Amino acid sequence: MSSGTESSGADTANSPLSVEEIKVAALAALTVAGSEAVLDEWRVSYLGRKSDLTNVLRSISSLPADDRKAVGASANLLRASLEEALAEKTQELRGAAGSVADALDVTLPGRRRRRGGLHPTTQTIRELTDAFGAMGFQVAEGPEVEWERYNFDALNIPAEHPARDSWDTFWLESPDGEGRSDMLLRTHTSPMQARIMEKADPPIRVVIPGRCFRYEATDATHEWHFFQLEGLAVDKGITFADMKGTLFEFARRIFGPDRKVRFRVDFFPFVEPGAEMAIDCFKCNGQGCSLCKGTGWIEIMGAGMVHPSVLRNVGYDPEVYTGFAFGMGVERIAMLRHGIDDVRQFAAGDLRFLSQF
Ligand code: YSA
C-alpha cells in the first residue's frame, strides 16, 4: 500500500482482513483521494495483484467448503463495487478540473476597473492655481466659517452698510440661541485678503481658492454654495495697468486667444477703482440667450485696486503700498471651458455628469 498522505489502506503484512474490513478501509481512503495520481495508488492498494481483496479471492480454495460460496460472492461483489466507485471518483475529479477550465476563458479581454476622478471644480482650481503659479503667485487657504469682522468690516463694509445686502448671508446662531452670532459662512473669499495682510509684509502675490455660501435663489448661473478664487498682489508701485495685464494674461491662458473678454467698471466697497470681467457666452456666441440672460456675456470676476482703508485696516501705509485684488467664480470658469449650461450640476452629485471630466 502507498505511503502517500492522502491514502490509507489495508496492511498486507498482517493477518488477512475480512471482506467487510477491506470495504470500510477502501471506501474511507477513496473519499479523501484528491487527485488522479492518488486514485492510481488507491487502485493498486485495493484492487491490485497484491491487495487484500485479491488475497481473499486467491485463498477461497483453501477455505472450508461451506464458507467458499459466501466469501467468494461477497469478495467479487466488493471488487465490482470498488471498481465502480473508482470510476465515479475519477469522473468527479475530472469534472471539477473541467469546470474551472470552462470558467476561465483567457482569450476574453480584461474587465476595465472603474476608477474615481477629480471633481471638475477641483480640476479647474488646479488649472487656475497652475496658471497663476506660473505668473509668480503663491497659494493659500482659509476658513469657510468666518468672522463678520473679516468677511465685512475689514473690507470697508461696516454694519448697516447697504453693500452688505449684495451678499445674502448665512449667519451662525449666537451661543445663547438668541439671534445671530458674529460668525457666518463666508460669502466670498475676500476675507482672506485681510487675514493674509495681517500676517505678512509686502510684497504679496497670492491666490486663495475656497468654497463660499450665499443665501440666495438659485438659477443656471447662481448656486447657493460655489467656489471662488481670490487673488491679491500688494507692493510698492503696483498700478491698475498691472492688474489689467495680469487678468488679461490669465484669460488668455485659461480661455485661449480667441475668446472675447469684457473688462468694465464695477463697484465694490473694498476697491477703488473697481472692475468686472466677463467672457462671451459659449451657448449663444455672444448673441444673447437664457444662460447669459440676454447679455451675450458671462461674468466671471470682480476686481479692483485695494481700497486705502483696507490697507490701513491691516496696518499697511497706503502712501507707500498699493495693490490689486480679484475674486473669480470657479464653476463659471469651468462652465465656459467645458460648455456646461447649468452651475447646479456641479453639486448635484450625478455621476453621469461627473464622469465626463
Ligand atoms: C472684487 C474685488 C476684489 O478686489 C476682490 C474680490 C472681488 C469679488 C467679490 N468678493 C465678489 O464676491 N464679487 S461677486 O459677488 O461679483 O462674485 C465674484 C464672482 O463669483 C462672480 O463674478 C461669479 O463668477 C461668482 N459668483 C458669484 N455668485 C455666485 C457665483 N458663482 C456661482 N453662484 C453664485 N451664486
Image: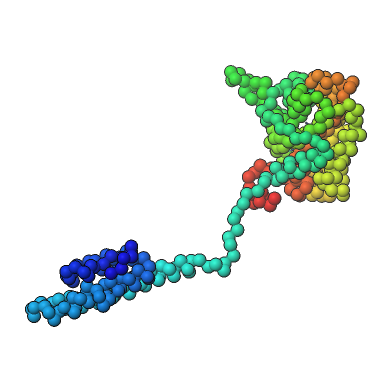
Q: Quadrant of residue 304?
A: top right
Q: Describe residue 283's horizontal placement relative to residue 344 as left or right.
A: right
Q: Which residue does the image show at 85% across and 22% down from the upper left?
A: 308
Q: Which residue does the image show at 22% across and 73% down from the upper left?
A: 52
In this picture the colour scheme is: rainbow
Q: Describe residue 311's horizontal placement relative to residue 1 as left or right.
A: right
Residue 348 place in picture, x, y as percent:
64, 44
Q: Quadrant of residue 7?
A: bottom left
Could you tell me if residue 166 is visible in this image? no
Q: Which residue does the image show at 8% across and 78% down from the upper left?
A: 64
Residue 119 place in picture, x, y as percent:
67, 45
Residue 56, above or below 207: below
Residue 135 place in picture, x, y as percent:
83, 39
Q: Who is closer to the viewer here, 120 or 221?
A: 120
Label count reads 0
Could you tell me if residue 74 is visible in this image? yes
Q: Describe residue 25's horizontal placement relative to residue 239 as left or right.
A: left
Residue 78 place in picture, x, y as percent:
22, 74
Q: Quadrant of the N terminus?
A: bottom left
Q: Quadrant of residue 169?
A: top right
Q: Describe residue 135's horizontal placement relative to residue 77 as left or right.
A: right
Residue 339, above or below 218: below
Q: Which residue does the image show at 26% across and 78% down from the upper left?
A: 49
